[in-house]
């Protein structure tokens, strides 16, 4: 866990949090050495520390005394989700909670940076669908796991989605910050949760809600990653509802009838077919005393995504955009009872890439799609992908070895990007993947040998690896 992008770095002194650099903080089982302060907020500080017992880096969240109630609630939730596999479920690993000088300390695994910071580093350049897909798959896996134990996350936003290690495992992500999470049994009608801009319509309207609010939040996050702007706005609840109506259509009257906050945003319509009518900004201000903030709409309708960004290099990418819009439509359904579930979303064509299979052997876009999906896979799937061929004689025309061993991955050389597929450079790829020795099994002809010399061994590996993962995904779909 790391909070550098969410909060400015802090000094070693804080009147509400008496922990200094190089302090040793002890729990009943471990000793932690504070090495740096990587974030602070109203809750306290986040300290980069080392567990002197295990020599592992950890993130210590040090909570100030005035936040005791909130920290107790978070600890209770963290203990609930601790039953989940942190690697397979894509949630941050929680080690322990303890007291230090009257302060509550929470120890987590050390992560990299969040998606908001990643967008800032890219100068708000949107992510490609091939980069968005593995993130979507991992978050759906997380929400499927949380749903299985009756937990609503309720705070999805880029700040709470952490990259594990973007240098060695590009786009491998985990959820952090369960301070607002709640059990489904704790839901009360009218409870306000989720940040504006990611808030589901049932929460805005004051309807009973379920874990489906997390699917809505995911739709908002994925659209942000593709558009590099918020689909519904983040500063004004009225403007969010107005944009929802403009882009997706007005919620059904039966939903508006049941909402305890409906009259805040809608007026009873006595003259037209629809019972409810969205208030104008002036009517909203007159009724609430709050002037709505202006917010330009990113889209007129979700289908605009297909043609909004014109730089499409292959026709198959157009089909991929249509699949992406289809997934967004399921995630952003205004009726939570018809919204797509994590289980069904994981089988959606955009995630399984079934619509890309026809071009699998000829399209660079499809090859990259499969490659990027391998980077964010959990350890369980990577186990499925391991391959150990029989040893063979190395080719005489190429002395390059392409053996990928489990363990630390060498960083990409200067000027190269770890996000790119192997054909773009010859740095090592994800260390969970496969161990392969690439070579030809038969003596090539002179013409074929000359061609093989020109081919990159890693490109041949990528072709092989793409076939392997397609087989795995196909097998999982059938099961």
Image: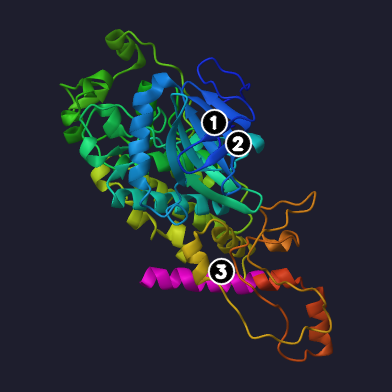
Tell me how far mark 2 sits from mark 3, CA to CA.
Answer: 53 Å
> Which residue corresponds to the image point at 40% horizontal and 22% vertical from the top-left?
67
> Which residue corresponds to the image point at 53% horizontal and 69% vertical from the top-left?
469
Residue 231, relative to residue 321: is it above or below?
Answer: above
Q: What label sits on residue 33 in the rendered view? A: 2
Left-right relation of 208 to 18: left
Q: What label sits on residue 10 in the rendered view? A: none
Q: Which residue is mark 3?
A: 359
Tell me how far mark 1 sits from mark 2, CA to CA.
Answer: 13 Å
- Please identify the dominant SS of the magenta region: helix
Tell me how far mark 3 sits from mark 1, CA to CA.
Answer: 47 Å
The image quadrant of residue 218 is top left
Residue 15, relative to residue 343: is it above or below?
Answer: above
Within 10 Å of disc 2 (Cα), the crowding (few <14, some 14-19, many 20+) is many
Of marks 3 and 1, which one's residue comes earlier in the chain? 1
Q: Secondary structure at mark 3?
A: helix
Q: Secondary structure at mark 1?
A: strand
Asked if labels 2 and 1 touch by Cβ distance under 8 angstroms, the answer is no
Q: Nearer the viewer, mark 1 or mark 2?
A: 2
Magenta segment range?
A: 462-479
Whether residue 114 appears in this view of the structure is: no
Q: Could you say where residue 63 lies in the image, as x and y percent from the top left?
A: 46, 26
Q: Could you say where residue 167 lies in the image, as x and y percent from the top left?
A: 66, 50
Which residue appears farthest toward the front when viewing the image? 28
Within 10 Å of disc 1 (Cα), the crowding (few <14, some 14-19, many 20+) is many
Q: Which residue is mark 1?
A: 46
Q: Secondary structure at mark 2?
A: strand
Q: Nearer the viewer, mark 2 or mark 3?
A: 2
Look at the image and say whether residue 464 sits in the magenta stretch.
yes
Q: Could you say where residue 143 lies in the image, as x and y percent from the top left?
A: 37, 48
Q: Could you say where residue 40 lies in the image, as x and y percent from the top left?
A: 54, 25
The one nearer the camera, 229 or 25, is: 25
């Amino acid at each position: 866990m790391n909070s550098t992008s969410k909060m400015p770095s802090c000094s070693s002194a804080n009147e509400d949090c008496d922990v200094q650099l190089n302090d040793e903080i002890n729990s009943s089982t471990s000793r932690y050495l504070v090495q740096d302060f990587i974030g602070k907020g109203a809750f306290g500080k986040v300290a980069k520390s080392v567990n002197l017992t295990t020599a592992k880096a950890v993130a210590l969240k040090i909570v100030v005394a005035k936040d005791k109630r909130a920290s107790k609630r978070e600890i209770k939730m963290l203990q609930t989700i601790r039953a989940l596999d942190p690697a397979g479920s894509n949630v941050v690993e929680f080690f322990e909670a303890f007291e230090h000088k009257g302060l509550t300390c929470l120890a987590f695994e050390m992560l990299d940076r969040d998606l908001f910071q990643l967008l800032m580093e890219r100068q708000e350049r949107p992510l490609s669908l091939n980069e968005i897909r593995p993130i979507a798959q991992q978050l759906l896996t997380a929400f499927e796991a949380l749903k299985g134990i009756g937990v609503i996350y309720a705070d999805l936003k880029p700040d709470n989605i952490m990259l594990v290690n973007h240098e060695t495992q590009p786009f491998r992500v985990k959820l952090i910050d369960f301070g607002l999470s709640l059990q489904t049994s704790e839901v009360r009608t009218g409870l306000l949760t989720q940040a504006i801009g990611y808030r589901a319509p049932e929460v805005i309207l004051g309807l009973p809600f379920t874990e489906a609010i997390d699917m809505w939040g995911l739709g908002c996050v994925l659209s942000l990653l593709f558009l590099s702007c918020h689909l519904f706005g983040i500063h004004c609840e009225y403007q969010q509802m107005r944009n929802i109506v403009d882009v997706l259509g007005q919620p059904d009257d039966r939903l508006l009838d049941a909402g305890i906050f409906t009259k805040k945003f809608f007026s009873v319509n006595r003259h037209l077919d629809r019972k409810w009518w969205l208030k104008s900004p002036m009517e909203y201000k007159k009724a609430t005393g709050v002037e709505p903030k202006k917010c330009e709409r990113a889209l007129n309708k979700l289908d605009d995504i297909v043609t909004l960004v014109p730089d499409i290099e292959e026709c198959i990418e157009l089909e991929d955009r249509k699949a992406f819009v289809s997934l967004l439509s399921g995630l952003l359904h205004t009726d939570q009872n018809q919204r797509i579930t994590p289980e069904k979303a994981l089988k959606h064509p955009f995630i399984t890439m079934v619509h890309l299979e026809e071009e699998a052997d000829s399209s660079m876009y499809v090859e990259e799609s499969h490659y990027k999906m391998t980077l964010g896979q959990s350890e369980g799937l990577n186990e499925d992908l391991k391959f150990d061929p029989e040893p063979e004689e190395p080719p005489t025309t190429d002395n390059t070895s392409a053996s990928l061993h489990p363990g630390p991955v060498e960083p990409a050389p200067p000027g190269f990007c770890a996000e790119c597929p192997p054909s773009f450079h010859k740095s090592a790829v994800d260390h969970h993947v496969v161990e392969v020795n690439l070579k030809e099994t038969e003596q090539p002809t002179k013409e074929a040998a000359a061609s093989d010399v020109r081919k990159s061994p890693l490109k041949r590996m990528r072709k092989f690896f793409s076939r392997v993962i397609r087989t795995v995904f196909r097998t999982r779909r059938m099961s």
